[in-house]
Amino acid sequence: MTADIEIRNVSKQFGAMTVLDHLSLSIRAREFIVFLGPSGCGKSTLLRMIAGLEAVDSGEIAINNERIDHLPPGKRGIAMVFQSYALYPHMTVRDNMAFGLANIGVPGKVIEARINEAARILEMPHLLDRKPGQLSGGQRQRVAIGRAIVKEPKAFLFDEPLSNLDAALRTRTRIELAQLHQRLQSTMIFVTHDQVEAMTLADRIVVMNNRKIDQIGTPMEIYERPATKFVAGFVGAPAMNFVDATLNKSGENATARFADGISVQTEIASSQLTDGKYTFGIRSEDVRIVAAGQGNADGVVDVLERLGERTLIYARLGDGQQIVGSDAGNSRVAVGDRIGLAFDGQKSHLFNETGRAWHAREA
Amino acid sequence: MSAPAASIKGRAFGDHLLLALVLLLSIVMIAPVLWVIGLSLKDNAELMADPNSVFHAPYTLKNYINTVGTSSVFIWVRNSIIVSGGLTLGTLILSSLAGYGFARLNFPGRDVLFVIVLFGLAVPEQAVLVARHQIFSMLKFHNTFQGLILPGLSAPFGVFLMTQYFKAIPKELDEAAMLDNASRLRIFWKVLLPLTLPAQATLGIFTFLGAWNDYFWPLISATRKDMFTLTVGMASTQTNFAQSEGIGFLMAQAVFAGAPILIVYLFFQKYIVTAVSGAAVR
């Protein structure tokens, strides 16, 4: 089973505080959608509104073209995996998985068959007669997913389900979730504030900020062509470099000039740009480390971060601004060295005062 | 002597002192019980002749046989079981439902109502006794089981305890059950109530012991001998029969009277210890 989910002009308020402000979104059947954003941006509230755990103040939510925003949670045909797993502590794993099915009158044999199938998929038949208190965090997570699977829902909702796992288990579970999606071909909505989870799992990412959607796109669209300065800064580690700049729009492409006189030729068409203050943005991997005097600017190395396959180099420019560049994993650069920084104009971005982004022409 | 060695020696002395105190307290607590059992096993004439005869043979079961044959103690025990059991069951049901309501339902005036319930903790039974007596007289509830049980069902402590316990259960469990298509009643019954068992046990034990030992209200409400609870019945025999029937007979009745509560303790001692230590209340 799978579902198209349509969210139309939805708003939500808690008291005087607006949590979601006229938000619209179309989720296609079999899509893995990730709601990504900082704490308090409204992503969990939106998920809970789809689940029916929060009322919709205005707007509509429809699944397969049928409005569901007036239905109770159990009648919407969806399953949810909670951050805290929310397993019933006094029931065995088997009873946890059977509870929802028994409530809708599914025959015992069918329940048993579905539980066994879910246990096989999640490789946990040996856990069925244990109680949640006898399981590790990872096992509880599997049970929570299993409880969702047996319901054969139209859509799966995940509310930061990996947050309580340690780093290694989180990576493993992430991969298992991706495999599960491929196997079940079900619509999945996943809420997280972790951009790595978003980038690795999503067909499309919905980046939310300040009660609204900033951008909807594939992971690489979000990463390479962020719609706003917020998206550019939130997605990617380390965060995108931002430098205040003035523009020279006399040529076909704009040239960004920094406060200390450094200029970078971008591939962004001058004709698109209006007057006003701009911020120049570039990701660390698009800043190459070269010999002093050979790049767009020179800087002094503040900090090195050796990540194995590459080295992040935090360099301070003449005007005190810090730029993060990327060098080979075995980089010979040392703290205190004077280096050159070469900016890739094709990969540079400009942001106006409202945060709107301009990018280089697509190749 | 090194400092750690001195510390260990000091600790050992402290442990011994504590042990001695615990032993002394145990003797103080258990001596009257043993005394009662000893007296119940002695012939009355022998006790009258020599009170110290309790310490040596011969012992007899005559008092127990007489108790089984003639005493009303079994009726009083039965009454106490009905009253204490009914009160406990009723308190658990009402407190759980009220606690769930206060913890989970949004309704107008909820917080004010909760404060009013808590005020009930501050009102002593004596303050409402005359009014309650008049109401129960009017309703002809005196000398009935409902007359003995109903006043105890207003249990603000139980409501408070269960409210706090329900509040401590994560709301995600309710939400997961809602997504599992469970009705509110089913969520209460199948998901939340089983999780409150430690609190139920605590409340149940305190309620049962309180009702079993209650003397004041049964003394007023139960005036017929066949409606006496154990406390009232025992008190009446102490006044009337201690001399005529004999102290041994009286003590045999006391042993019968204490047996049910001892059984309750044996079965629930784990919960009683938890309840008294407060560990069951999260």
Image (cartoon, helix red, strand yellow):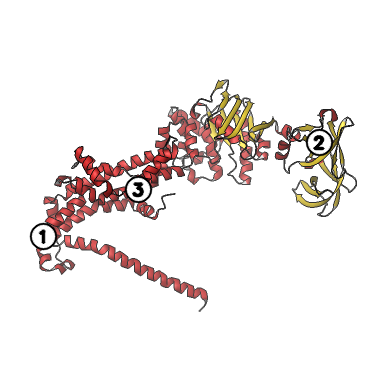
Residue identifier under label 2: A347
x and y percentages locating residue B40 in the rendered image: 17, 60
- The residue depicted at 57 percent of the width and 28 percent of the height is A155
Seen as rendered, the residue at the extreme bottom is B1
The CA distance from mark 1 to mark 2 is: 107 Å
Q: Identify the secondary structure beneath mark 3.
A: helix
Viewed as shown, does residue B237 lie left or right of A67?
A: left
Which of discs 1 and 3 lies nearer the camera? The answer is 3
Q: Is residue B122 above or below residue B41?
A: above
**Can residue B77 be seen here?**
no
Secondary structure at badge 1 equals loop
Rendered location of residue B13, percent (x, y): 41, 73
Q: In this figure, which residue is indicated by the disc labeled 3?
A: B121
Residue at coordinates 20% horizontally, 45% vertically from top-left? B221
SS category of the residue bearing label 2: helix
Instruction: Return the chain for callout 2.
Output: A
B223 horizontally vs B89: left or right: left
Q: Nearer the viewer, residue A351 or B197?
A: A351
- Tell me the kind of residue under disc 3: Leu
Frontmost residue, B192 versus A357: A357
Looking at the rendered image, the disc whose residue lies closer to the viewer, 2 or 3, is 3
Indicate which label's residue lies in the foreground, 1 or 2: 1
Query: In the figure, residue B277 lies in which quadrant?
Result: bottom left
Q: Residue at x 57, y 31 (%)?
A: A12
For disc 3, the neighbor class at 10 Å (few under 14, some 14 to 19, many from 20) is: few
Q: Chain of mark 1?
A: B
Mark 2 belongs to which amino acid? Lys
Q: Quadrant of residue A341?
A: top right
| Res A220 seen here | yes
Q: Amino acid at mark 1?
A: Gln
- Circle 1 is placed at which residue position? B243
